[in-house]
Amino acid sequence: MEAMLAKITLLRKKERHRLFWLHEDTTNTQPENAAMAESVYKVIELVGTSTESWEKAAAAAIERAGKTLRDLRIAEIGQLDVQLKDGKVETYRAKIKVSFKYEND
């Protein structure tokens, strides 16, 4: 059990600062002298779950958010944990922050 907790702690440290880039627009359609348009983004917090891994838990949350939200930009892993049952891992959970751009009126 101690070895499993040490592995979980190590994985949490590695994943803590990992960013999933969902969309990166590298095209520049504005001339250099054009004024930069201001943008507003909404950040929401989600919890994804998986019986297999934290990566699949995070992917499940992003995939589900993508069904109802458009223009997802960045997802940041905030916290990783597990649900235990009878001393064994039952569910991996990933708490993530997802941002999306507000659309113009």
Image (spheres, rainbow, N blue to C red):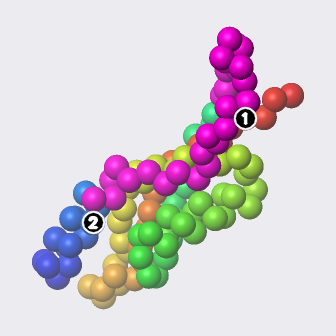
* Residue tagged 2: 11
Whether residue 59 sits left or right of residue 104 in the image: it is: left
Where is residue 9? Give x, y as percent: 22, 65
| Residue 104 visible at all | yes
Residue at image x 33%, y 53%?
A: 16
What is the x, y in percent for residue 3? 14, 79
The x, y position of residue 4, in whole percent, is: 20, 78
Determine crowd level at label 2: few under 14, some 14-19, many 20+ residues with C-alpha closer than 10 A: few
In this rendering, position of residue 88 left or right of residue 38: left
4 relative position to 42: left or right = left
Q: From this view, report whether residue 37 is shown above or below residue 17.
A: above
Would you identify the image quadrant in which residue 38 lies? top right
Q: Do the numbered discs 2 and 1 sit on residues whose CB atoms are within 8 Å? A: no
Q: Is residue 34 magenta?
A: yes
Is residue 48 a member of the stretch shown in magenta?
no
Kind of residue at disc 2 = Leu
Q: Main secondary structure of the magenta part?
A: loop
Residue at the spot x=64%, y=42% of the render? Answer: 25
Front residue of 40 and 25: 25
Tell me what residue is drawn at x 51 percent, y 60 percent. 47
The secondary element bearing badge 1 is classed as loop
**Residue at the farthest left position:** 2
Q: Amino acid at mark 1?
A: Tyr
Residue at 68 percent of width and 11 percent of height: 33
Quadrant housing the N terminus: bottom left
Q: Which residues are magenta?
A: 14-40
Quarter of the picture holding the C terminus: top right
Q: Would residue 45 be seen by someone viewing this image from the given angle?
A: no
> Residue 102 shows which numbered tag?
1
Q: Earlier in the sequence, mark 2 or mark 1?
A: 2
